C-alpha cells in the first residue's frame, strides 16, 4: 500500500502532502483545486510520466524549476520503502527507489503498479486499437515478466523488417533473418495476450453482471492481427510480395485488437456513455484482479468516479472496489458524492479535502 505522497511544485501543488493514506481514499474539492494533479503525482511516482499531455514544463508549477514527488510504501512483510521522482524544466529526470538512485522506470512500475480510470479510459472501448493493445500488454507484462524481452525483440525485428521493405532493393537473406526472428517473438507475444484475455474474461463477465446486468451478454474476442487459421510465419510468407509492394509488414501483433460486443453488436457503437464507463471499470477491475493474484495489490487512480454514473451505479463500482480490497485514490467534486460506507469500514476509508493546492484530511469524515 502507498502510505503517503509528498509533492513539491507540481502544477498548483506547491507543497502538498497526501496522507496518511488508507485502503480507500476519497479526494474531493471544487474545479481547479488540484484533485487530478494529486492523481498525476501518484501516476508519475509509479510510471515516471503523466497521463496528461504536455512535457515537464506543463507539470512544474509556473515560475519554478523542478518538481519533486516522494512516496512511502508499506511493505507486506514489514517496514517501508521510499520512492521518488524529480524532474527539471529541461526534462532531466532522476528516480530514487529505497534511497538509491535508479535508472529503471520498470523498477518503479514493479514497486507501484497502478491502474488509471479517467475520462480518457473511454478510449479503451471507443478509441484506436492501440489503446486495447496497451491494455493487453500492461496485463501481460506485469504477469509474465519474460514476455517483456520477447516484446522488445518482436518490436526490433518488425522495425528492421519494415526498414528493409521500405528500402526496396532487398537483400533476401537479411529479410529472411528478420522475418524468422519476427515470427518467433510475435507468436510468443500473441500467445501471452491470448492467455491474458482468457484469464480476464473469467473475471470480467461476473463483474459486468454485478456492475451493469442491464447491458446484456458482453463478449471480448481477441483478434491477433493475422489470419487465425495459420501460423504467423505462414502468414508472412503468403503476404511477402504484397508487403514488398506496400513497403511494410501488414499483419501481425502490431495490428491486434479486442472486439468488445454486447449481444453481438459493437459495444462502442451501441452503449450509452454511462454504460461505456461501467464496462471500462469492469475491464480495469478485472485487470487489477489478475495482477492481485500474481503479485499482490494494485493502486487504482480514479479521476471523477461519479461523472457519467447515476448514484446506484456509482455505488456498485465502489462496492466492487471494496470487495477487491485494492487500494484506491478516488476523486470527486462534491463531498457527498461518495458516502464512505460504499467503500467499506470507516477505518479503511479516508477523505481528503483539496483547496487551492492544499490538502487536508477531512476531520468530520474521519471522526464520524
Ligand atoms: N504548471 C502549472 N503551474 C501552476 N498551476 C497549474 C499548472 N498547471 C495547471 N495548473 C492549475 O492547477 C490547478 C489544478 O488543476 P487540476 O486539474 O488538478 O484540478 P482539479 O481539481 O482536478 O479540477 P477539475 O474538478 O476541474 O477536474 C488548476 O487551477 C490549473 O489551472
Ligand atoms: Mg480534475
Image (cartoon, rainbow, N blue to C red):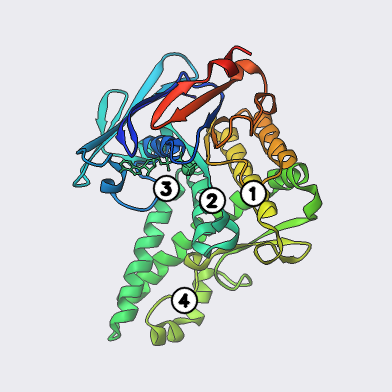
Query: Which quarter of the rendered image does ligand 1 occupy?
Result: top left
Tags 2 and 3 in contact by the CB under 8 Å rule?
no
Mark 3 surroundings within 10 Å by alpha-carbon count, few (fewer than 14), some (14 through 19), many (20 or more): some
- Tell me, yes or no, whether the two marked residues, 4 and 3, touch with CB atoms within 8 Å: no
Is residue 19 positioned above or below 116 on the image? above
Q: Say whether disc 1 or disc 2 marks the residue closer to the N-terminus.
A: 2
Instruction: Please tell me which residue is depicted at 22% across the width and 37% down the height of the picture.
Output: 66
Q: Earlier in the sequence, mark 1 or mark 3?
A: 3
**Which numbered mark, 2 or 3, is in the foreground of this view?**
2
What numbered label is drawn on residue 51? 3
The residue at 46%/29% (across/down) is: 354
In the depicted view, which residue is nearer to us: 228 or 57? 57
Q: Distance of mark 2 from mark 3, alpha carbons?
A: 11 Å
Is disc 3 placed on a helix, strand or loop? loop
**Gap between marks 1 and 3 measured at Cα:** 20 Å
Q: Closer to the N terminus: mark 2 or mark 3?
A: 3
* Residue named by callout 2: 119
Left or right, residue 177 beside residue 309? left
Q: Which mark is residue 308?
A: 1
Mark 4 crowdedness (10 Å alpha carbons): few <14, some 14-19, many ≥20: some
- SS at badge 2: helix
Q: Earlier in the sequence, mark 4 or mark 3?
A: 3
Closer to viewer: mark 4 or mark 3:
3
What whole-number distance in Å separates the C-alpha atoms at marks 4 and 1? 38 Å
- Labels 4 and 1: the sequence-earlier one: 4
Badge 2 local density, few (<14 within 10 Å), some, or many (20+)?
some
Residue situated in front as seen by the camera: 92 or 25: 25
Read off the residue under disc 4: 250
Amino acid at each position: 500500500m502507498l502510505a503517503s505522497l509528498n509533492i513539491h511544485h507540481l502544477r498548483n501543488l506547491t507543497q502538498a502532502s497526501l496522507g496518511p493514506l488508507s485502503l480507500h481514499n476519497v479526494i474531493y474539492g471544487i474545479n481547479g483545486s488540484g484533485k487530478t494533479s494529486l492523481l498525476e503525482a501518484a501516476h508519475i511516482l509509479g510510471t515516471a510520466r503523466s497521463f496528461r499531455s504536455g512535457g515537464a514544463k506543463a507539470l512544474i508549477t509556473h515560475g519554478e524549476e523542478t518538481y519533486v514527488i516522494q512516496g512511502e510504501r508499506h511493505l507486506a512483510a514489514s517496514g517501508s520503502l521510499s520512492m521518488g521522482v524529480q524532474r527539471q524544466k529541461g526534462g532531466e529526470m532522476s528516480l530514487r527507489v529505497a534511497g538509491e538512485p535508479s535508472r529503471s522506470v520498470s523498477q518503479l512500475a514493479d514497486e507501484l503498479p497502478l491502474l488509471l480510470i479517467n475520462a480518457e479510459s473511454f478510449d479503451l472501448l471507443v478509441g484506436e486499437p492501440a489503446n486495447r493493445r496497451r491494455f493487453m500488454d500492461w496485463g501481460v507484462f506485469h504477469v509474465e515478466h519474460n514476455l517483456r524481452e520477447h516484446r522488445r525483440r518482436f518490436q526490433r525485428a518488425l522495425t528492421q523488417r519494415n526498414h528493409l521493405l521500405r528500402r526496396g532493393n532487398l537483400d533476401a537473406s537479411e529479410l529472411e533473418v528478420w522475418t524468422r526472428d519476427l515470427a518467433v517473438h510475435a507468436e510468443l507475444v500473441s500467445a501471452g495476450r491470448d492467455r491474458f484475455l482468457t484469464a480476464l474474461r473469467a473475471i470480467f463477465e461476473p463483474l459486468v453482471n454485478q456492475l451493469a446486468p442491464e447491458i446484456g451478454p458482453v463478449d471480448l474476442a481477441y483478434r491477433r492481427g493475422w489470419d487465425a487459421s495459420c501460423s504467423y510465419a505462414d502468414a508472412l510468407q503468403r503476404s511477402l510480395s504484397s508487403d514488398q509492394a506496400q513497403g511494410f509488414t501488414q499483419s501481425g501483433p502490431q495490428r491486434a485488437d479486442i472486439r468488445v460486443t454486447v449481444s453481438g453488436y459493437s459495444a462502442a457503437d451501441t452503449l450509452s456513455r454511462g454504460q461505456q464507463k461501467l464496462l471500462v471499470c469492469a475491464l480495469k477491475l478485472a485487470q487489477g484482479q489478475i495482477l492481485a493474484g500474481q503479485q499482490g495489490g494494485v493502486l487504482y487512480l480514479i479521476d471523477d468516479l461519479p461523472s457519467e454514473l447515476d448514484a446506484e451505479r456509482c455505488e456498485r463500482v465502489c462496492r466492487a472496489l471494496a470487495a477487491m480490497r485494492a487500494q484506491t485514490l478516488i476523486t470527486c467534486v462534491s463531498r457527498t458524492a461518495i458516502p464512505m460506507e460504499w467503500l467499506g469500514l470507516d477505518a479503511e476509508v479516508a477523505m481528503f479535502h483539496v483547496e487551492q493546492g492544499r490538502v487536508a484530511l477531512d476531520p468530520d469524515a474521519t471522526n464520524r
